Image: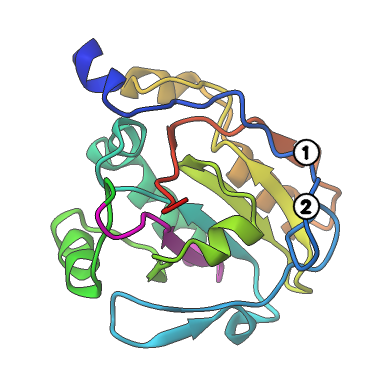
Amino acid sequence: MKITTLLTCAAFAISFSFTGRALADSAVLGQPVPDFSLPGADGKTHALSDYKGKFVVLEWTNPQCPFVHKFYDSGTMQQLQKEETAKGVVWLRINSSAPGHDGAQTPADAAAYEKSHHVASTETLLDPNGTVGHEFNATNTPQMFVISPQGTLLYAGGIDDKPSADPADIATAKNFVTAALDEAMAGKPVTTASAPPYGCSVKYAD
């Protein structure tokens, strides 16, 4: 991938780390997360509370981000989605790009992307006003969150420990999402509950 392409992604924003500082009604590590409802690529409204009793992964995404391309063009994200949903995990992709900004999608756009990229998530949700993104302090794409069946935030941050857009780094990276899910499903505490998110900045309206 050309360096110029990476630079057009605005801010890689590795510096935005999830610290647990939040406003009222915002997600905080170790605490119950706020409920939300968003329209999906399927044209239906989906609420987080619909999935109470299940592990939930939230994946912030932007189809124009090179760091997102890293995981989707390689098929890595789709494979992770297949593996975890097969275990009963709910995987929700969330796009908080505002209309007119890079990566913004309509439900039809999101559905077409799902089909062309063989996305295996439970659903893609659209957050054009950025309300849910701000509640979860989502700053980057991709950025990941793991929620327990009781609704508690177990993990927040980058998908792994290799903050690059090079697909070759995936093979040697430690995936924090799968590690958190494996530990939590085994009844163990999550060893790494947060890590600095990396990637493109979320394209909020403000």
Judge whether 166 appears above or below 202 on screen.
Answer: above
User: What numbered label is drawn on residue 19?
Assistant: 1
Residue 143, magenta (yes or no): no
Element on which disc 2 rests: loop
Residue at 60 percent across and 77 percent down: it is 36
Within 10 Å of disc 1 (Cα), the crowding (few <14, some 14-19, many 20+) is some
Number of numbered discs present?
2
Residue at 25 percent across and 41 percent down: it is 64
Q: How is the image coloured?
A: rainbow
Residue at 44 percent across and 49 percent down: it is 80
Tags 1 and 2 in contact by the CB under 8 Å rule?
Answer: no
Residue 20 position in % (x across, y down) = 80, 45
> Please, what is the three-letter code of the amino acid marked with disc 2?
Ala
| Residue nearer the viewer, 152 or 126 | 126
124 relative position to 117: left or right: right
Disc 2 designates what residue?
22
Within 10 Å of disc 2 (Cα), the crowding (few <14, some 14-19, many 20+) is some
Residue 14, quarter of picture: top right
Residue 130 position in % (x across, y down) = 49, 61
Residue 114, quarter of picture: bottom left
Residue 163 position in % (x across, y down) = 50, 22
The segment highlighted magenta reads: 85-100
